[in-house]
Amino acid sequence: MVNEALTAGIDEARLWARHQALAEHGATAAGGVNRQALSDEEIAARRVLVEWGRAIGLAPFSDAIGNLFLRYEGTDAQAPPVLTGSHIDSQPTGGKFDGTFGVLAGLEAVEAMRAAGFRPRRSIEVVAWTNEEGSRFAPGMMGSTLFRGSRELADMLAVRDGAGSSVAECVRAVRAAEPDVPERALGFPVAAYVEAHIEQGPLLELERKTIGVVSGIQGKRVFRVTVTGEENHAGTSPRRVRKDALVAAVAMLGRLHAEMHDDEDVVKFTVGLLEVSPNAPSVVPARVHFSIDLRHPDPDVLARLGDRIAPICEAVRGPCAVEVRELSHDPPLEFPIAMRDLVRDAAAGLGLAHMDLPSAAGHDARHLHYLCPTGMIFVPCAGGISHNEAESCTPADLAAGARVLVEVLGRLAA
Ligand SMILES: [Zn+2]
């Protein structure tokens, strides 16, 4: 049985309108969103969230990495809160729903609770984690990683974007824009975490399901490779003296792609960033910098393949030098059965078609998983397309996800 007083308070039109309103901050000509972590666009979107929260009495908080919390006070103010949310930063060519849905669904759930006069025992906090995407500042999921306590704050504050700005400077700018948002300690006890998110894959749509009960998240390792050669004249330098960093990098990419290939298409190996320096037509390239994103659901395979990367690069570097740096190693994980049952029961109670499925994409829930019972709710996105300006969802599916969320939150916080 679901708590109909709560689920009836989810307002599909308001939830949809808020997605459109937030998408104005960083709107692109092609209908997507470019709202990168700690940017002016994100500062503006945070302001809107704080105002929406304040309008229903939610207290905003932030912390040393800029995570943003909106707190709905429970009857037992001392009890660790239930957290729900996701992120509002986007890829440079992102969509309106990735991350944003989880934050707005959390806010909508609290709206529904207030409308029903439901005050839970535990406080509920809607959170927007800092830098989930990792496109401007690597690695991603910075806010949730630091909240978990598995990385050093100083290391993350020192990270710089391509233009030379540091996370520290940008967090300062965010916090300076929010003098009315108090700061709390980074990390605190949490009773449970639930993250609603668009699937970013095609399974729900193909199976004609509205709700995905997320079973876990596949593992991921992230690397940066730097190949160093020597600048030289394209016309005069003979091959035997050349140290062409691009030739070496191309050999590495060829070998890596070949060795990471599996006929079953389970291994996900991606080089999405490649920088050539000095990047001039008549100069032998002196330096190449590229990224590696490697994912697999099996921890042993992920470990074995990831450990192959440095030796492969070393083997084909030729006269150049190569440095392989691992930025993160997140093993695959499975969410607790009890959390999956809660999501499944809520979907079933609401009469929504649902299925269990693993998450192929990484989420902030990965890090909360090690702090408290954690679960995720997926809703479909058209064609499974995400990290793309064409990302698309239906108002009805988003509202269905928010109904499942408020039911789950109501039980966890009771
Ligand atoms: Zn996301």
Image (cartoon, rainbow, N blue to C red):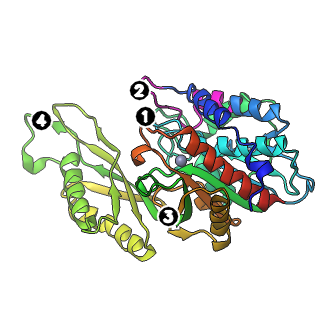
Question: Quadrant where the N terminus lies?
Answer: bottom right
Q: Which residue is drawn at 46% across and 25% down?
A: 28
Residue 221 image-quadrant placement: bottom left
Estimate the x, y position of residue 275 in percent, counting from the top left.
32, 41
Q: Which amino acid does label 1 sit on?
A: Glu
What kind of element bears circle 4?
loop
Q: Main secondary structure of the magenta part?
A: loop
Q: Nearer the viewer, residue 191 or 355?
A: 355
Q: How crowded is mark 1: few (under 14 residues within 10 Å), some or many (20 or more)?
A: many
Question: Quadrant where the C terminus lies?
Answer: bottom right
- Which residue does the numbered mark 3 point to in the structure image? 357
Mark 3 or 4, closer to the camera: 3
Q: Is residue 69 visible?
A: yes
The CA span between labels 4 and 2 is 39 Å
- Whichever of labels 1 and 4 marks the residue nearer the N terminus, that label is 4
Estimate the x, y position of residue 4 in percent, counting from the top left.
77, 52
Q: Does the magenta stretch include residue 196?
A: no
Residue 354 image-quadrant placement: bottom right
Q: Residue 389 carries which label?
A: 1
Mark 3 or 2, closer to the camera: 3
Q: Give the range drawn in magenta.
A: 28-47
Q: Which residue is drawn at 9% across and 40% down?
A: 237
Tags 1 and 2 in contact by the CB under 8 Å rule? yes
